[in-house]
Amino acid sequence: DINMGCPAKKVCAAWAGSALMRDEGLVGRILTAVVRAVDVPVTLKIRTGWAASQRNAPIIAGIAEASGIAALAIHGRSREQMYTGEAEYDTIAEIKSRLSIPVMANGDIDSPEKAAQVLARTGCDALMIGRAAQGRPWLFREISHYLATGERLPPPTLVEVRDILLGHLRALYEFYGEPAGMRIARKHLGWYAKDHPDYSEQHRTDFRAVINRAETAEAQFDLTRAQFDALIEQVDRRAEHPGEAGTGQWPNADTVRKLSAAA
């Protein structure tokens, strides 16, 4: 998979990522060379162009197909936009209408309804989802279910979120090794803690602060489990006794520190 869509400044400064879209001849040479050099299908990710005034994604898409690229993913923003504003899908639809290879739409697909809308608007063969799945890996099953049935799945329970997250942590430790896996896990832990009705900003801050101080993978894992178990217990208690005091949110900072020390 060749990434000509990354908008990061340090990447583009090295003439990589979406900076490559500024040189169509170079794009063709790179794609042709890679396709000839490997025995597996080669795919490509691009943006709509370098800037609004340089919307050359349709040209790049034609070069890609002619070079033997097996599938194309398109983010509906220019590099100039980075991740600001809204993704546009007209360029993606135009490209899809011209190509015979599979085309994937990308950008701002953050719900089952939006997924269905983008597929209908662009006619694309598939979707690529990035930021919206951070901390929400169940988004894929929600979209799949909605596309198949037209109905939304219920959101995952806290128990399901806990179990998915703990499985994710184990996989990170196993794949990257514990030191690297633990570092990578920190950003994922922050994503899992966002945008849930039972989390307050203060409790998310406390949670991230303690998780970031964990010195071993075991401590990180145990602390995460303890956090969720405590939250699940509070939410269950609130459901059983609605009039009882309690927020149903993360344990307070003192409790978090005690859990960290115990871990």
Image: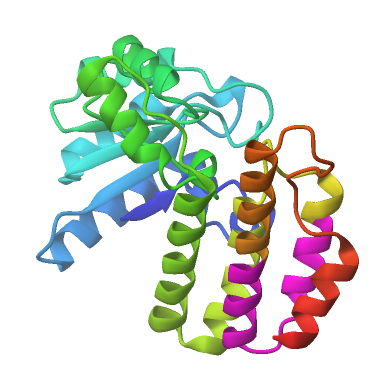
* Residue at the spot 51% in from the left edge and 31% down from the top edge: 49
The mark tally for this picture is: 0
Seen in the image, is 21 located left or right of residue 121? right
Instruction: Give above or below for 15 relative to 50.
Output: below
Residue span colored magenta: 205-226
Percent of width and height locating residue 73: 34, 37
Residue 134 appears anywhere in the view: yes
* Residue at the spot 84% in from the left edge and 42% down from the top edge: 245
Residue 188 location, quadrant: bottom right
Which residue reaches farthest left?
39
Magenta includes 223? yes
Which residue reaches farthest right?
254
* Residue at the spot 40% in from the left edge and 24% down from the top edge: 112
Instruction: Give above or below for 55 relative to 247.
Output: above
Percent of width and height locating residue 236: 61, 46
Nearer to me, 162 or 113 = 162
Nearer to me, 37 or 167 = 167
Coloring scheme used: rainbow
Could you tell me what secondary structure mostly forms the magenta stretch? Answer: helix
Residue 212 location, quadrant: bottom right
* Residue at the spot 66% in from the left edge and 51% down from the top edge: 193
Instruction: Give above or below for 193 relative to 222.
Output: above
Percent of width and height locating residue 144: 27, 31
Residue 196 appears anywhere in the view: no
Q: Where's the N terminus, which quadrant? A: bottom left
Q: Where's the C terminus, which quadrant? A: bottom right
Nearer to me, 30 or 141 = 141
Percent of width and height locating residue 100: 13, 26
Seen in the image, is 200 located left or right of residue 51? right
Magenta includes 61? no
